[in-house]
């Protein structure tokens, strides 16, 4: 699909939304395409890290309300929106590290696409907005779940009710963004972060992601039980023994996830 570019290099999948003339606004067909890419990353053992970014001056302006091809009947519209939701769920379901490389404006579903990733790295020129209400719409693409967990319920309501444009520095302060860097350093910063993630034990990373994602839906007792199960799984791989050997030999470990 020309509107979604997928590059696979040495375990890193880079997904680029490729409608720069439309600020990478997402068409009806692209929702299904996004879900397919996310499902592939989940199932492909060779894929270790996913980076999502946009072509040109924007990350993603959200849904394309002009060229989206929205169905006319209420039932068909509901089916369409459930498909949008499945795309968001597929992103959250990826058991590997995901990074949003936000090179420009991220609005509406485009913002929530970024927030659905594990880490958000933004250029200092990036801008963010839960713009839905200014378009006569309510928040979607998982934003109603993601945003309160990141910024708290009152701030989430402020951002969603007023749909203000938030500069990158303010987004970092709010916890929407992990790091803000100069625009000309964005690629290098993300590349360095990816390289660091690739040195980590894949199974341990996956288990850690799963445990943290469950943090707001489990009791403490459930959490420590899940931790115990995760450690047993980690110990069934060769990576723990490799870590011990590397420590004793004063070298960096080489993890395989086997």
Image (tube, rainbow, N blue to C red):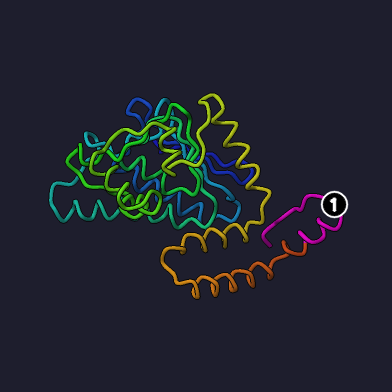
Residue under the point 41% across and 55% down: 90
SS at mark 1?
Answer: loop
Q: Is residue 200 left or right of residue 4?
A: right
> Which residue appears farthest toward the right when viewing the image?
249
Magenta-drawn stretch contains 246: yes
The quadrant of the image that shows the C terminus is bottom right
Residue under the point 65% across and 44% down: 196
Name the residue nearer the viewer: 205 or 13.
205
Quadrant of residue 204 within the rendered picture: bottom right
**Looking at the picture, does residue 187 appear above or below residue 197?**
above
Q: Is residue 121 left or right of residue 134?
A: right
- The crowding category of the residue bearing disc 1, from other C-alpha atoms within 10 Å (few below 14, some 14 to 19, many at least 20), is few
**Looking at the picture, does residue 107 appear above or below residue 35?**
above
Q: Is residue 241 left or right of residue 141?
A: right
**Looking at the picture, does residue 231 appear above or below residue 155?**
below
The quadrant of the image that shows the N terminus is top left
Residue under the point 20% across and 37% down: 134
Residue 56, horizontal then vertical, whole percent = 43, 26
Name the residue nearer the viewer: 109 or 220.
220
Quadrant of residue 193 within the rendered picture: top right
Magenta-drawn stretch contains 210: no
Name the residue nearer the viewer: 150 or 24.
150
Residue 175, horizontal then vertical, whole percent = 44, 44
Residue under the point 52% across and 63% down: 211
Residue 58, horizontal then vertical, whole percent = 39, 29
Magenta stretch bounds? 242-258
Tell me how many marks there are: 1
Residue 97, horizontal then vertical, whole percent = 54, 51
- Say which residue label 1 marks: 250
């Amino acid at each position: 699909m020309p509107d979604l570019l997928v590059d696979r290099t040495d375990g890193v999948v880079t997904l680029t939304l490729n409608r720069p003339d439309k600020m990478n606004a997402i068409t009806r067909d692209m929702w299904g395409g996004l879900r397919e890419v996310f499902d592939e990353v989940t199932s492909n053992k060779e894929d270790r890290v996913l980076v999502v970014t946009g072509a040109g001056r924007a990350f993603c302006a959200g849904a394309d309300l002009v060229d989206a091809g929205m169905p006319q009947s209420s039932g068909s519209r509901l089916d369409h929106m459930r498909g949008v939701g499945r795309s968001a769920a597929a992103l959250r379901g990826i058991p590997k590290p995901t990074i949003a490389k936000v090179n420009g404006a991220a609005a509406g579903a485009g913002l929530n696409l970024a927030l659905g990733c594990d880490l958000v790295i933004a250029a200092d020129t990036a801008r963010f907005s839960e713009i839905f209400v200014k378009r006569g719409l309510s928040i979607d693409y998982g934003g109603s779940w993601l945003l309160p967990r990141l910024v708290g319920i009152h701030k989430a309501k402020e951002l969603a009710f007023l749909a203000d444009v938030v500069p990158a520095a303010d987004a970092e302060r709010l916890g929407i963004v992990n790091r803000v860097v100069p625009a000309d350093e964005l690629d290098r910063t993300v590349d360095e972060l990816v390289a660091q993630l690739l040195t980590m034990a894949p199974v341990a990373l996956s288990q850690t992601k799963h445990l943290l994602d469950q943090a707001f839906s489990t009791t403490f007792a459930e959490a420590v039980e899940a931790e115990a199960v995760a450690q047993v799984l980690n110990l069934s791989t060769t990576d723990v023994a490799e870590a011990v050997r590397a420590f004793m030999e004063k070298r960096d470990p080489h993890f395989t996830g086997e």
